[in-house]
Image: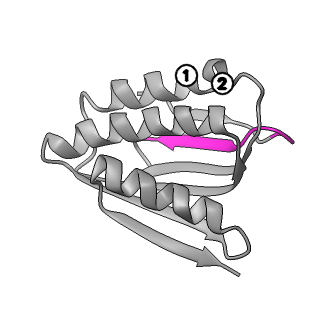
Amino acid sequence: MERLYIHETEYSPEIILDKWQGKFFIVGVSLMEHPFKFYEHVIEWINKYSLDPNDKTIFTFRILYLNSASLVNISLIFKALSKIYNKGHDVVVRWYYDERDPTIREYAEDLENLYKLPFEIVVIN
C-alpha cells in the first residue's frame, strides 16, 4: 500500500498516511471552499487500508482551524476509522487542539461521542 502525502497549504492541512511506518497525521488548517475533492483521496486511502490494517492504528489530528464543510469530511474519516475499530483492531485517535480555541476541542468531543473511538484529547499551549 502506497504512502499518501499531501503538502500543507494556507488553506489545507498536511496529510501523511503511511501504513508501513505507522504514521497517520492530519495537521494544520482546513479552510477549503470545496473540501470534498481534497478529502476524497484520503477517505479512499483509509477505506483501502481498512481491508488490511495494522494491529494498532494511532491517528493524529492537530487541527488549528476547520470550517463546517471540512468537519463533514473529517467525520467521514472517523466513520472509516470506526469500521476498523469495530472489526476488533486497536485504533486510537489523538486530537491536539490549541487551548485558545475551545471549539476545536468541542469538535473532538462530539466526534468521540458519535463514533465511540478511543480518544486522547491533548491541549497545546
The foreground one among 33 and 59 is 33
- Amino acid type of the residue tagged 1 in the rendering: His
- Amino acid type of the residue tagged 2 in the rendering: Phe
Which of the 4 image quarters holds residue 38?
A: top right
Residue at far bottom of view? 125
Side (left or right) of 14 relative to 46: right
Side (left or right) of 40 relative to 78: right
Q: Secondary structure at mark 1?
A: helix
Task: Please determine whether, in this image, residue 118 is positioned above or below residue 12.
Answer: below
Callouts 2 and 1 close, C-beta under 8 Å:
yes
How does the figure colour the protein chain or chains?
one colour
Whether residue 53 is visible here, answered yes or no, is: no
Which of the 4 image quarters holds residue 35?
A: top right
Q: Kindly identify which residue carries mark 1.
A: 41
Magenta region, residue range: 9-18
Question: Which residue is depicted at the point 41% across and 31% down?
Answer: 46
Identify the disc placed on residue 38: 2
Image coords of residue 6 (percent x, y): 68, 34
Question: Which residue is depicted at the point 51% across and 40% down?
Answer: 17
Question: Which residue is depicted at the point 52% across and 39% down?
Answer: 74
Task: Please determine whether, in this image, residue 66 is positioned above or below residue 99.
Answer: above
